[in-house]
């Protein structure tokens, strides 16, 4: 009988997130071959991961954010105080895991922001560390801090998994890095849309957390302008803001570091807020176009999910293409985050050119099938696990 290797899987984010959803698509296919021990923050992630292995959760997991979009600068450095407090809980829980499970064969950090926790885990278990990178790294030229950060990653990570070529470029640790693209398990065959009649409302969708840097406020405001001009538009939202207790909420607001949008915006007439939904297929059935106008300058898993459903996307991206998107073929893009007028024009274009929704949607589906093969990527991760565990 083959040995079932033990994997300590660190999920730094407790709320519903793209990193959690992306990892679940892999884990649900691999948990019978590997024994997963999960370490995560208290919240939705504990409930999801509990279906696939033993879960250890804590109040907070120590993180350090050096991503392009939300690295520490100015007043944001105050968040380090929170991470120092979380470090106490992190070390305590890692020691508890060591006591309970004795040993593991490898460690998989599901988001590079949890690097401090993964480093302590490596010291405690003395096993190979796989680091998943899902956002662009802050890699500014002549930044001594960024260079130091990458040296730390290179020292402790045995393997680095980037979700696409853009993310890989910002890590640039060639001997250890590889691309492992996000995948999507389709329960049944999806029938592509037959098009939208001009007399019907145009249904624009957004799925994810309602955060400022993801461009949700800009999307709502752009739709509001067109709605007031008598455009028949419905904005379908699926997600929530990040829930915080009263004390934390006031602190974030006082220092002006709260990333949640103004929740009063969700009361607009044209908005249909589905809240959190477990079966995302139901969301994609309700929309004609996906919009993800974030300031991340990289595309979330929403883009390739939409592509799998034959739905084009509107994105904010400096380049004209990415692994899951080609401008003017699989959707339309604009380059400057927060460009309200440009976003309005793109929505108006799709409103007046409904046939393009079907045309671009078909091209998006072909592109995703080419780059995001579930069979190829699953086999790749399985081999990475086996290689790391055996070393």
Image (spheres, rainbow, N blue to C red):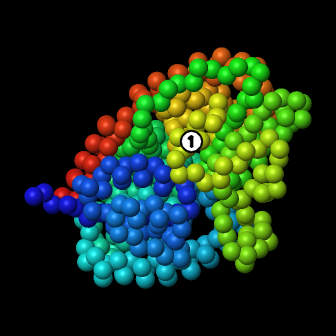
* Residue 174 in view, yes or no: no
Q: Is residue 47 above or below residue 278?
A: below
Residue in view at x 66 percent, y 39 percent: 205
Q: Can residue 130 be seen in this view?
A: yes
Q: Which residue lies furthest to the right in this view?
A: 229
Quadrant containing the N terminus in the rendered view:
bottom left
Residue occupying the point 66% across, 49% down? 274
Residue 104: x and y, percent? 26, 69
**Image: 189 above or below 207:** above
Residue 260 placement, left or right of 367: right
Where does the image place residue 191, in percent across and percent down from the top left? 50, 26
| Residue behind mark 1 | 282
The quarter of the picture where the C terminus appears is bottom left
Q: Is residue 33 left or right of residue 201?
A: left
Number of callouts: 1
| Residue drawn at (62%, 77%) of the image | 81
Say which of 160 and 270 sits in front. 270
Quick one: SS at disc 1? helix
Q: Where is residue 235 in the image (x, y as percent from the top left)?
A: 73, 40
Picture quadrant of residue 38:
bottom left
Q: Residue 370: x and y, percent?
A: 41, 27
Give 316 or 165, whichever is nearer the viewer: 316
Rendered position, 18 above or below 283: below
Q: Which residue is drawn at 76% across and 44% down?
A: 271
How many residues crowd mark 1 within 10 Å: few (<14), some (14–19), many (20+)? Answer: few
374 sits left or right of 135 in the view: left
């Amino acid at each position: 009988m083959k040995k079932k290797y033990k994997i300590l899987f660190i999920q730094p984010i407790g709320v519903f997130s793209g990193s959690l959803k992306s990892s679940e698509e892999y884990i649900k296919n691999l948990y019978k071959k590997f024994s997963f021990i999960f370490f995560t923050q208290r919240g939705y992630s504990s409930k999801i991961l509990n279906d696939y292995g033993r879960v250890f959760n804590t109040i907070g997991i120590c993180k350090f954010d050096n991503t392009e979009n939300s690295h520490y600068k100015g007043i944001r450095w105050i968040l380090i105080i929170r991470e120092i407090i979380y470090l106490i809980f992190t070390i305590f829980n890692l020691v508890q895991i060591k006591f309970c499970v004795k040993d593991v064969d490898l460690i998989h950090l599901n988001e590079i922001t949890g690097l401090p926790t993964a480093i302590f885990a490596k010291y405690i278990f003395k096993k190979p560390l796989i680091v998943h990178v899902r956002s662009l790294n802050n890699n500014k030229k002549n930044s001594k801090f960024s260079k130091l950060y990458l040296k730390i990653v290179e020292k402790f990570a045995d393997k680095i998994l980037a979700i696409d070529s853009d993310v890989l470029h910002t890590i640039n640790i060639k001997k250890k890095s590889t691309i492992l693209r996000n995948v999507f398990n389709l329960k049944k065959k999806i029938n592509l849309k037959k098009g939208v009649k001009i007399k019907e409302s145009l249904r624009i969708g957004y799925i994810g957390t309602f955060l400022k840097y993801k461009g949700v406020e800009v999307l709502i405001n752009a739709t509001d302008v067109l709605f007031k001009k008598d455009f028949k538009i419905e904005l379908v939202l699926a997600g929530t803001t990040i829930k915080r207790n009263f004390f934390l909420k006031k602190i974030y607001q006082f220092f002006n570091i709260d990333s949640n949008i103004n929740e009063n915006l969700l009361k607009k007439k044209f908005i249909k807020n589905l809240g959190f939904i477990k079966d995302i297929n139901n969301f994609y059935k309700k929309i004609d176009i996906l919009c993800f106008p974030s300031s991340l300058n990289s595309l979330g898993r929403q883009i390739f999910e939409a592509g799998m459903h034959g739905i084009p996307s509107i994105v904010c991206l400096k380049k004209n293409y990415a692994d899951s998107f080609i401008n003017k073929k699989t959707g339309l893009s604009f380059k400057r985050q927060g460009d309200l007028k440009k976003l309005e024009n793109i929505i108006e274009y799709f409103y007046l050119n409904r046939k393009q929704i079907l045309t671009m949607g078909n091209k998006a589906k072909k592109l995703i099938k080419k780059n995001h093969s579930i069979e190829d990527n699953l086999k790749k991760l399985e081999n990475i696990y086996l290689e790391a565990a055996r070393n």
